[in-house]
Amino acid sequence: MASVFTGAFFAFGQNEVDVYRLSNTYVQGSARFDAMGGSFGALGAESGCIGINPAGFGRSSVSSFSFGLSSTNVQTKTNFNSNSSNFTDFNVRVPNIAATVVSDVSSSNSGLIYTQISFGLNRVANFNNSFNYSGQQLASLLDVFSNNAYGIDPLDLYNQQPYTSSLAWITYAINDTLDNGQYYYTPSLSNQGNVIHNRTVLNKGGINEWYVALSANYLDKIYFGASVSYNTINFSESIIHKETAVDTAVETMRSFVYQYDYKTKGGGLNVKLGAIFLPTDFLRLGIALHTPTFYQLTDEYTANMQAVHSYGVNSVDPAYVPADKYKYRIWTPTKLVGSLGLIFGDNGCINIDLEYLNYGWGRLKTTNDEAYVPYNYAYENQVIKDQLVDALNIRIGGEWAIQNTFFIRAGYGYYPKGDTLMRTYGKNYNQTFSGGLGIRVNRVYFNASVRYLMQSSVYKAFYESRTELDITNMTFNIGMQYKFDYK
């Protein structure tokens, strides 16, 4: 659920956007976890704590099983030249499945009272964030294609600009002229405000975390935990850009449609280490370290174009439709989490998490697959280091228990943006608001939650100073959870 920002037209290759997408995550755990804003670092005894502090499993004294179901409604509103557009995406999924097996080892006289092994699934990122815009515009995408083709022989365009200018030239959306031995190109559509833009951007996918964790309870005072997670990623983006001439009396070209499709699949490992301390019955302190996630990824991309002229339709021969695949690696930044929990007996609790990461620590790495040509990401990594910055995420959550049977919960999250360009355009932060209810019947728990994520950003279609639109993204997540304790 990262903010959308594109400073250039398209990035045909890996860059800081990919690193930020995989690093900027909002863990979607159980309904109880979500209702409290994902703030659980010093509390524990809840499956969602795997996203914050695996030592939380050490708080479990009985074995348990839980699973959840959630519906996510993403509403995106764009404003382009005073024209507003709305886009809605809805899906239902299982965001959380978890099991914890507890062993009583108090008879060993080692100080250990319980040990636990936990395993399950969490949703840690949702990339469903689609939008569109429409309106009259002076600049044209064909201006970009023409400028990029300057100085290139038309017969060499496919080798140098296969995803952009080559497609435009093949469909006669741009035309070449040889002047003093130098080729330059001009658009078939004028840029005098007689063009209507319509662009749709379809973003889909997410990240799932499969984990196994080991934890222990030492004298009911110190809790330790460690986990190994394998994250699977599936992301796709389709950009469909259409321009239509308003005044066909002066334009021989009527319209064109350009489409770019991109998808990423892969997975990566990470380790989390944590501890929770109980100085008093009232106070709990938590600390956790998340190693980078070491992703192995495969990108696939293609593009196509069609242009409508007064004399007919020009399409691209399938032999000249580009398609490529490339493997590479991404290391996300290390995270440090500090937590404070206040316990009010059987009446409830409050938890505060402070999560620090520096997005500039992320790195792109060449693939170790010998079937692909190695690539030196020195330039891209320098951009990451210069453009991406550190952030301190804050999560606050609370629970009020009524006779240890009924539960009322609420939470808040504050997430500063870790990209200097994102901070320049739109708000400097994203926020989450959440709440929920729970009921306990003997050893069975039913929980429900509502979580609202609000994001804002600016999207630039191609030129830095033009084709700019404001985006407001609102994600409503409704979750339900069933949990059963085995005694």
Image: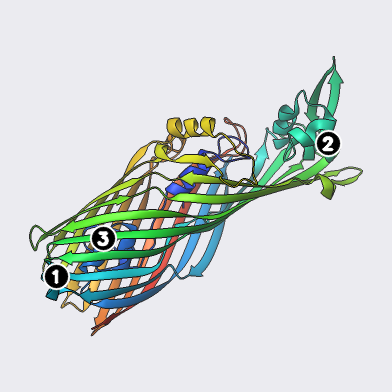
| Residue at screen point 78% across, 26% down | 152
Disc 1 marks a residue whose amino acid type is Asn
Instruction: Give whichever of 470, 333 is nearer the camera.
Output: 333
| Residue at screen point 28% across, 68% down | 46
Task: Please indicate, yes or no, whether residue 239 appears anywhere in the rendered image.
Answer: no
Q: Spatial distance from mark 2 to mark 3, Cα to Cα?
A: 68 Å
Numbered label attached to residue 251: 2
Check the image and report above or below for 362 versus 113: above
Residue 188 is drawn in which quadrant? top right
Disc 2 marks a residue whose amino acid type is Glu
Residue under pointer 1: 347
Q: Spatial distance from mark 3 to mark 1, Cα to Cα?
A: 27 Å
- In the current view of this chain or complex, which residue is farthest to the right? 311
Provide residue 136's location: percent of width, then percent of height.
Answer: 67, 40
Check the image and report above or below for 170 versus 25: above
Q: Spatial distance from mark 1 to mark 2, Cα to Cα?
A: 73 Å
Provide residue 7's location: percent of width, then percent of height.
Answer: 55, 35
Residue under pointer 3: 225
Disc 3 marks a residue whose amino acid type is Gly
Mark sitting earlier along the chain (1/2): 2
Instruction: Give whichever of 193, 392 is nearer the camera.
Output: 392
